[in-house]
Image (cartoon, rainbow, N blue to C red):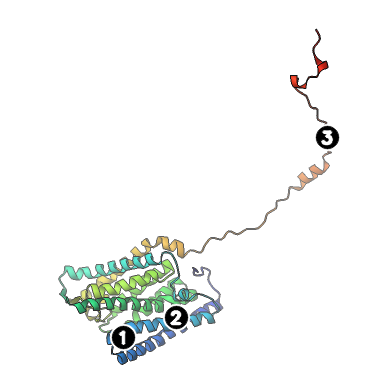
């Protein structure tokens, strides 16, 4: 896994990275339009309108993979496709994804809990066989859509922006773009844009702590699935994913978010900030393993010469004559001869 360069790049390198970010962001906007049109055309021709969001997400991932790979090649940097997209191969990828799912679910529960405690949720259950099939289909759609959105926002473009302006400015900028990107959704307000920016902050921190999209992907998927499927509420103004559980929130806008859903409510902002704190604590091991550059031992041969005074003393000292060795044999019976017998 390649760590982000901790040294501040030169002006020419920053300019290149900024150009790559702008180009990749533009390609995402174009790809989103192309993917939507392709999905609309195919689903209409085959009469599978229910599969249109899933097809659009697949097409978007394909177009992003092609465009980002070309940009990576233009920058003269050879990388595998999964590394370009931000999905490095590692032993902990599944655990990171599951951890993200748990965190996303917990944040949504914390955000929706005040509405439930105040009795502002009107819940209905649709217990039909088709509802179960629709639930499974929506889970798959939300999983692929979350991956596509993470690749677009926290994948290749985010890394290029980090190289250009640093992680802090890149996180703020990408969170702002993430919030503004949902500003035209149904029921959006300035409050919902702000809360969505905080969601972008949480997802960006998830990438910064792991340098991969496994945890942010799981978090994003669980966030959307918990809101739309588990609680049956609108997801960023889109109310197409409720199946078994269908809920209508009644109450003030600051509590329920109105037609935009919980992402426009005030308690959701608190839940997201709590999520950032929890995220930092539970990813300490991943941050150590994946975000710190490895320590490389360096050095050079060192030969210490003796002091000149010592060298002079050794040269002036006379060489001692070799001393002859004298061997003293033990007076034992094995070393005596016949003539050595003692005389009486």
The image quadrant where one finds the C terminus is: top right
Is mark 2 in CB contact (under 8 Å) with mark 1? no
Q: Secondary structure at mark 3?
A: loop
Mark 3 and mark 2: span between their CA atoms?
Answer: 83 Å
Residue placed most toward the observer, 20 or 334: 334
Residue 151 in the image: above or below residue 327: below
Residue 74: x and y in percent read: 54, 82
Residue matched to label 3: 322
Q: Secondary structure at mark 2?
A: helix
Of circles 3 and 2, the one toward us is 2
Residue 240: x and y in percent read: 25, 82
Asked if residue 42 shows in the view, the reply is yes
Residue matched to label 2: 65
Residue matched to label 1: 52
> On the image, which quarter does residue 188 sit in?
bottom left
Residue 331 in the image: above or below residue 173: above
> On the image, which quarter does residue 299 sit in?
bottom right
Residue under the point 21% across and 68% down:
113
Q: Determine crowd level at label 1: few under 14, some 14-19, many 20+ residues with C-alpha closer than 10 A.
A: many
Residue placed most toward the observer, 147 or 309: 147
> On the image, which quarter does residue 212 sit in?
bottom left
Mark 3 and mark 1: span between their CA atoms?
Answer: 100 Å
Asked if residue 253 shows in the view, the reply is no
Q: Earlier in the sequence, mark 3 or mark 1?
A: 1
């Amino acid at each position: 896994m390649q760590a982000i360069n901790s040294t501040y790049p030169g002006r020419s390198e920053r300019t290149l990275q900024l150009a790559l970010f702008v180009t990749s962001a533009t390609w995402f906007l174009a790809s989103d339009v192309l993917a939507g049109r392709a999905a609309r055309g195919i689903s209409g021709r085959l009469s599978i309108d229910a599969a249109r969001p899933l097809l659009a997400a697949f097409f978007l991932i394909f177009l992003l993979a092609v465009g980002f790979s070309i940009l990576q090649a233009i920058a003269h940097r050879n990388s595998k496709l999964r590394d370009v997209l931000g999905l490095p191969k590692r032993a902990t990828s599944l655990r990171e994804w599951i951890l993200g799912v748990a965190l996303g679910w917990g944040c949504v529960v914390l955000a929706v809990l005040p509405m439930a405690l105040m009795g502002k949720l009107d819940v209905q259950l649709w217990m039909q066989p088709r509802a179960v099939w629709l639930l499974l289909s929506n889970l798959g759609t939300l999983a692929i859509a979350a991956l596509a959105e993470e690749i677009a926002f926290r994948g290749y473009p985010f890394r290029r922006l980090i190289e250009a302006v640093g992680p802090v400015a890149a996180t703020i900028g990408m969170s702002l773009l993430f919030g503004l990107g949902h500003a035209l959704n149904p029921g959006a307000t300035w409050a919902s844009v702000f809360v969505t920016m905080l969601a972008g902050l949480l997802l960006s921190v998830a990438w910064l702590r792991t340098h991969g999209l496994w945890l942010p992907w799981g978090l994003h998927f669980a966030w959307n699935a918990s809101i739309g499927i588990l609680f049956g509420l609108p997801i960023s103004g889109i109310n197409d994913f409720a199946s078994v559980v269908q809920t209508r929130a009644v109450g003030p806008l600051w509590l329920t978010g109105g037609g935009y859903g919980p992402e426009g409510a005030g308690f959701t902002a608190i839940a997201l900030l709590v999520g950032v704190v929890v995220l930092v604590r539970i990813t300490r091991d991943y941050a150590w393993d994946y975000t710190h550059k490895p320590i490389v031992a360096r050095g050079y041969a060192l030969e210490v010469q003796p002091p000149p005074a010592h060298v002079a003393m050794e040269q002036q000292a006379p060489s001692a004559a070799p001393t002859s060795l004298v061997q003293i044999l033990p007076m034992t019976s094995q070393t005596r001869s016949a003539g050595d017998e003692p005389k009486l």
